[in-house]
Image: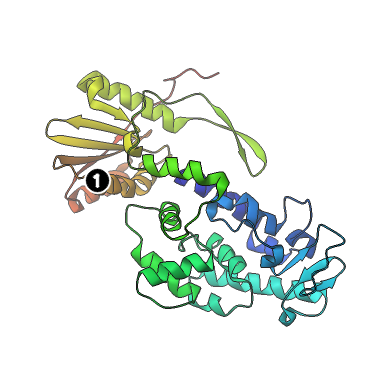
């Protein structure tokens, strides 16, 4: 799963569980048996790729509905098949859930506003509240929720603390510039967990090996694709791939096939010349300025990762020419960067036949 897919999954969660929906959430919406649309099912299963809290007892949600009617743990309180542990929440299921929901809403608001230190004091299981905090943090936290692993990470930096907010702040400050929060999460988990979930072990191992050594490909699929988003089917026009393919053809025609690399080390298109390397990052937005805003950071990251002494050139490629104001924006960027930078547009209209 790449960054785009992570963001799509996160947006899917946030569209389903808006702040308003959480405010209106009932106990049955929060947790249940054989209901794959509860808040807790989204946290544990549907958003597993955004940091796993899978496994263990469902008591991590504060309250849960038992699947087996005969289940009756002595250490838990029970009301109409719902179980909870902390007497601080209340003596009946409705009171307990009202308190938990109130604390979840407080966690969400604190996370949205970046007040992560205050989350430590909220009465909720750590696994629950920090998964919630990450999902509403605009990716300003690292999606690791296992307390033992987090403490190991803190200790490795010489910090002795059990406060999750302090460990999160430590991880954020140490995050390499060339890794997104999910790549960084995988690196930390692999180093400090001492384990990997059986189902994901082979996948993560293979991904780690090829992360910075992705081979170039010959072509990209430009046909429309059906995709699932929030349970609905949508037809995605492969504009990005169309631009990428046409750019590749233009460069090959001028510089030769052997000098043009497609998707090598995740760079959309790379042009290799005797004295320089040019990185092309493709965006399909409707405005040149939006393409540049989204692509420039990626281009700088590619340059940072590549240790070659060759001159590096950066190009953002979109489908529309810049307007007058955007041309000024491009000129401004050129004056600020030490790298050679430019924007180019590629018209993909009628370039490819679609089914």
Seen from the viewer's position, the closer of residues 64 and 237 is: 64
Point out the residue furthest to the bottom here.
88
Residue 73 shown left or right of residue 184 in the figure: right
Residue 31 vs 273, above or below: the answer is below
Residue in the image at 69% along x and 60% along y: 21
Q: Quadrant of residue 291?
A: top left
Q: Quadrant of residue 235?
A: top right
The image position of residue 13, as x and y in percent, is: 61, 53
The image position of residue 82, as x and y in percent, is: 81, 67
The image position of residue 340, as x and y in percent, is: 18, 43
Residue 250 vs 306, above or below: the answer is above
**Circle count:** 1
Mark 1, Cα crowd under 10 Å, few <14 / some 14-19 / many 20+, is many
**Residue 79 is at least partly visible in this image:** yes
Q: How is the image coloured?
A: rainbow
Q: Secondary structure at mark 1?
A: helix
Which quarter shows the C terminus? top right
Residue 190 shown left or right of residue 68 in the figure: left
The image position of residue 282, as x and y in percent, is: 36, 36
Seen from the viewer's position, the closer of residues 118 and 201 is: 201
Seen from the viewer's position, the closer of residues 195 and 244 is: 195
Q: Quadrant of residue 28?
A: bottom right
Residue in the image at 69% along x and 58% along y: 39
Residue in the image at 23% along x and 51% along y: 332
Residue 77 vs 6, above or below: the answer is below
Seen from the viewer's position, the closer of residues 76 and 17 is: 76
Residue in the image at 78% along x and 58% along y: 32
Q: Read off the residue under disc 1.
A: 303
**Residue 168 is at least partly visible in this image:** no
């Amino acid at each position: 799963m790449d960054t785009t897919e992570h963001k799509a999954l996160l947006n899917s969660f946030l569209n389903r569980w808006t702040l308003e929906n959480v405010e209106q959430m009932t106990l049955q919406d929060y947790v249940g048996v054989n209901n794959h649309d509860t808040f807790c099912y989204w946290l544990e299963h549907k958003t597993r790729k955004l940091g796993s809290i899978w496994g263990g007892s469902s008591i991590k949600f504060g309250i849960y509905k038992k699947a087996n009617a005969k289940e009756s743990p002595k250490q838990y309180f029970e009301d109409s098949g719902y179980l909870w542990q902390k007497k601080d929440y209340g003596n009946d299921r409705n009171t307990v859930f009202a308190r938990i929901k109130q604390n979840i809403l407080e966690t969400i608001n604190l996370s949205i506003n970046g007040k992560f230190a205050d989350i430590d004091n909220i009465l909720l299981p750590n696994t629950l509240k920090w998964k919630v905090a990450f999902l509403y943090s605009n990716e300003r936290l690292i999606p690791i929720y296992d307390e033992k692993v987090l403490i190991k990470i803190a200790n490795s930096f010489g910090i002795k603390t059990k406060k999750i907010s302090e460990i999160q702040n430590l991880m954020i400050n140490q995050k390499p510039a060339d890794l997104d929060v999910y790549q960084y999460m995988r690196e930390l988990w692999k180093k400090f967990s001492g384990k990997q979930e059986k189902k994901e072990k082979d996948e993560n191992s293979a991904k780690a090996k090829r992360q910075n050594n992705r081979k170039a490909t010959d072509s990209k699929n430009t046909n429309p694709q059906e995709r699932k988003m929030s349970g609905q089917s949508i037809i995605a026009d492969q504009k990005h791939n169309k631009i990428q393919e046409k750019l590749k053809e233009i460069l090959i025609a001028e510089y030769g096939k052997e000098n043009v690399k497609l998707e090598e080390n995740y760079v959309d298109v790379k042009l290799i010349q005797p004295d320089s390397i040019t990185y092309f990052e493709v965006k399909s937005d409707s405005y040149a300025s939006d393409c540049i805003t989204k692509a420039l950071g990626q281009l700088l990251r590619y340059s940072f990762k590549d240790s070659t002494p060759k001159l590096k050139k950066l190009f953002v490629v979109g489908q529309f020419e810049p307007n007058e104001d955007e041309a000024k924006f491009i000129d401004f960027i050129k004056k600020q960067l030490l790298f050679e930078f430019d924007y180019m547009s590629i018209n993909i209209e009628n370039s490819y036949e679609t089914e």
